[in-house]
Each structure stands twice: as structure tokens, then as C-alpha cells.
Amino acid sequence: MKNTLLSVAALALTASAAFADSHAVVRMGTEGAYAPYNFINDNGEVDGFERHLGDELCARAELTCEWVTNEWDSIIPNLVSGNYDVIIAGMSITDERDEVIDFTQNYTQPDPSSYVVLAGNEGMDLSGAVIAAQSSTIQASFIAATGATLVEFATPEETVAAVKSGEADAVLADKAYLAPIVEADAELAMTAQQELIGGGVGMGLRESDGELREAFNAAIQSMKDDGSLNALIAEWGIGEPF
């Protein structure tokens, strides 16, 4: 574990030096597969709540930003190694993640995680159920700590498919992600049970990029102060306002 942390630290220092040499462009890393937070639209471009938020934050911080996508499972290692400068991908702030990277202040309130099951099973006992979650998420960690059986998948779409195929009894994910899926699919239903996990969503940065973190912190705070962040949260149905 110690050697791993030293390797991560060395990668972060190298990436930070590279950023200092080419400060003109900030690369914004996202998954592009977790609507409404982020997704790829019909034109093949990153879209969603975080695309609009990120563009506005970059404008307020007077930064030139470009967007890149990365699979969720490797999104933190590829930040640390310098493939991009910021994670803006619906990532909840947790103590475990904060040991490896830094976070800005949160730009969403903690959003309830909801369970989705096959329609007609809304009253099922979930304590001993087989529950699907996307790997490396706060939902996967939560399920692993309970008496339920966790099955993990690389993408959020696969977790929902597991419920429809009978591979899992339920899926646990952010309510904002699951609600439109349930609304569009009569085979699925959301249970009344919800879990409040994590400390809200923030931007992830290398621990050595303090100046960049503070630039984004100031931009997030300015959007909170003038009400524009709450307007964006309401527009995309992300959760409760600040």
C-alpha cells in the first residue's frame, strides 16, 4: 500500500509540472454515460448538467477548457497520471477518494440513492437481496457494507439491464439517474426506500493543483451566490437547491 501511494504521488507531481507548463488549456474529464449529469448527445458531444456547469465555471475562472471522456473504473488513476486536469463526472466527495485526490466544494447537495426493481416488486425485502451497482461508486460501497449481495458492473446501463434480466433483484444508483429510466419503462419501478450517501458532488483534482482547485472553488461559490447554480440544478432535475 505504501509503495502504491508513493507511485500515485510521483505521478501527481509529474502531471502538475506538465499543467504548469501548459496552463492555457484545462482538460475536463467526464464519463459521458450518466445522464442527466453527463452523457454523449446525438452530435457525439459531451452534454448534460455537468457540461453546462463546467463551461460556465471555466468562463468565470477565465480558463480555456476542453472535454475528454474516460471510463469510470479508471477515472481517478487517469487524473493522477495527467490524462486530464479535472474530474467532473457526478463524483461524490468521500473520505476514501479524498486520500488520493482533492475536491472542490460541492456543487450539488447529497442526492438520495434509490432502488429500482421490476414492477410489482416494490415491497420486496432488500436486506438479503441481490443488488446491482456500478463498480467504484458510493452505492457499491454501501451495499457491500450491508447484508445484501452486491453484483458490480462497469456501466450504469448494465446495472439496470441486470434487474430486467433477473440477474439482480434491484439496482441502487442516484435517484436523478434512475427516475427518467423508470418513467420511460413500465417494466421497472422505484421503491420507497432510499439511502442518503456521500457529501454531495464535487470536482476532483490532483492534490498538487491547489491553485486550480481554488479557481474553481471561487467560481462555484459565485454561482451559488447569484442563484445560477440553483437554476441549473432545477433545469436538469439534479436534486435539492442550495
Image (cartoon, rainbow, N blue to C red):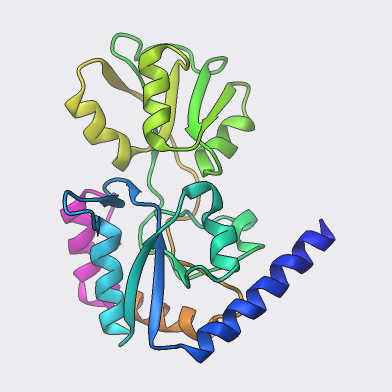
Position of residue 215 in the picture relative to residue 236 (left or right) = right
Residue 173 percent location from the top left of the image:
41, 36
Q: Examine the structure image and report whether residue 61 is included in the region drawn in magenta.
A: no
Foreground of the two, 22 or 203:
22
What residue span does the magenta drawing correspond to? Answer: 222-242
Q: Is residue 235 magenta?
A: yes
Dominant secondary-structure state across the stretch colored magenta: helix
Q: Is residue 201 above or below residue 13?
A: above
User: In what quadrant of the picture does the C terminus appear?
Assistant: bottom left
Residue under the point 37% across and 56% down? 109
* Up/down of 13 relative to 54, above or below: below
Q: 155 or 237: nearer the eye?
A: 155
Instruction: State the image coordinates of residue 151 (x, y, percent, origin top left).
Output: 55, 25
Q: Is residue 63 visible?
A: yes
Q: Residue furthest right?
A: 2
Which residue is situated farthest in the front direction here? Answer: 44
Q: Nearest the camera: 104 or 225?
A: 104
Q: In the picture shown, does residue 98 fall above or below 64?
A: above
